[in-house]
Image: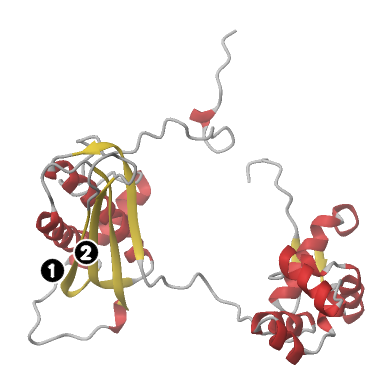
């Protein structure tokens, strides 16, 4: 972490909840544990559970711990582990019951190999200044669609639907406008060109002259896995070589920086780019963020 001073601990246990509690102990007693706690020994588990406040258990927190103490006199992780599971489910929730079982070494929360696939991808921003022209709005929507399409490809999904929206400021005087269009795609796709074309079609249909647009965005939905689609005899055929073109595009942008290669409609003209005048300093992550001293 580039020496930024974050406390780091390693906790190992037979369940997620025990591993998180071991991680808490590793940070709390750094000198004794060397920032590593292994909870495979039942005696060590019991010792830690008897000491740890119930509020330090993963998924409990301050409010729930207050209720556990007030209603069931549960103050420690050990007491939670030995509470009646049916009582915990009745008075609290099934997640509290599962947490108690996990403290006993019974896995209830599956360990995923990676983040779950999203069912929706949204890309939206507030403009740096109000936009009145359709061309400027098209440029912003093309950019947001390109960002969403890259995220779609990263998770290996194809979209069947795209929604485009644009709105005026809720705080500006006068009539407020909020427009949206939902476009069904002719075939599942992750091709930026197809998605931008559909978004532009929807944008043109809902655009209203004279509106001071303050925000726009797109929503991709109705996903299918790339390898799980079947051909439709009566549907239009996808673009030839689409997968290869998008792979090259993503590879160049990953190597040269986002936006190194993009569609012609995705440009930063028209005043829609966010100003970002008050960003936090990046002293620890960027050489350009270091303050300069004149000697």
**Residue under circle 1?**
239
| Residue 251 image-quadrant placement | bottom left
**Residue plotted at (70% across, 80% down):** 96
Q: Element under label 1?
A: loop
**Residue under circle 2?**
191
| Residue 210 image-quadrant placement | top left
Viewer can see residue 61: no
Nearer to me, 95 or 23 = 95
Give yes or no for contact between labels 2 and 1 (Cβ–Cβ under 8 Å): yes
Q: Position of residue 81 (x, y in %)?
A: 82, 82
Relative placement, left or right, of 236 versus 71 is left
**Residue plotted at (10% across, 55% down):** 204
Q: Element under label 2?
A: loop
Nearer to me, 184 or 91 = 91
Quarter of the picture holding the C terminus: top right
| Residue 24 image-quadrant placement | bottom right
Viewer can see residue 273: yes
User: Rounded to the nearest whole Å, what is the CA distance between mark 2 and mark 1?
Assistant: 9 Å
Image label count: 2
């Amino acid at each position: 972490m580039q020496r930024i001073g974050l406390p780091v601990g390693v906790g190992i246990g037979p369940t997620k909840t025990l591993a998180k509690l071991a991680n808490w102990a590793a940070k709390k007693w750094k000198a004794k544990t060397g920032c590593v706690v292994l909870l495979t020994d039942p005696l060590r588990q019991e010792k830690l559970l008897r000491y740890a406040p119930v509020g330090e258990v993963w998924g409990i927190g301050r409010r729930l711990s207050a209720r556990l103490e007030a209603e069931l006199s549960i103050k420690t992780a050990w007491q939670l582990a030995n509470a009646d599971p049916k009582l915990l489910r009745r008075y609290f929730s099934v997640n509290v019951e599962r947490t108690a079982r996990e403290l006993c070494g019974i896995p209830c929360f599956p360990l995923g190999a990676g983040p779950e696939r999203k069912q929706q991808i949204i890309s939206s921003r507030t403009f740096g200044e109000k936009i009145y022209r359709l061309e400027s709005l098209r440029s912003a929507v093309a950019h947001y669609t390109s960002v969403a399409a890259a995220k779609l490809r990263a998770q290996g999904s194809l979209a069947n639907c795209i929604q485009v929206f644009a709105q005026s400021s809720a705080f500006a005087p006068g009539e407020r406008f909020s427009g949206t269009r939902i476009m069904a795609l002719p075939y599942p796709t992750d091709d930026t060109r197809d998605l931008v074309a559909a978004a532009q079609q929807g944008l043109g249909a809902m655009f209203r002259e004279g509106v001071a647009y303050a925000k726009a965005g797109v929503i991709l939905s109705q996903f299918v896995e790339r390898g799980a689609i079947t051909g439709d005899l009566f549907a239009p055929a996808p673009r030839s070589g689409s997968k290869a073109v998008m792979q090259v595009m993503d590879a160049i942008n990953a190597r040269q920086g986002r936006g190194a290669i993009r569609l012609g409609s995705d440009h930063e003209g028209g005043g829609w780019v966010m100003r970002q005048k008050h960003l936090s300093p990046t002293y620890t992550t960027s050489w350009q963020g270091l303050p300069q001293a004149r000697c």
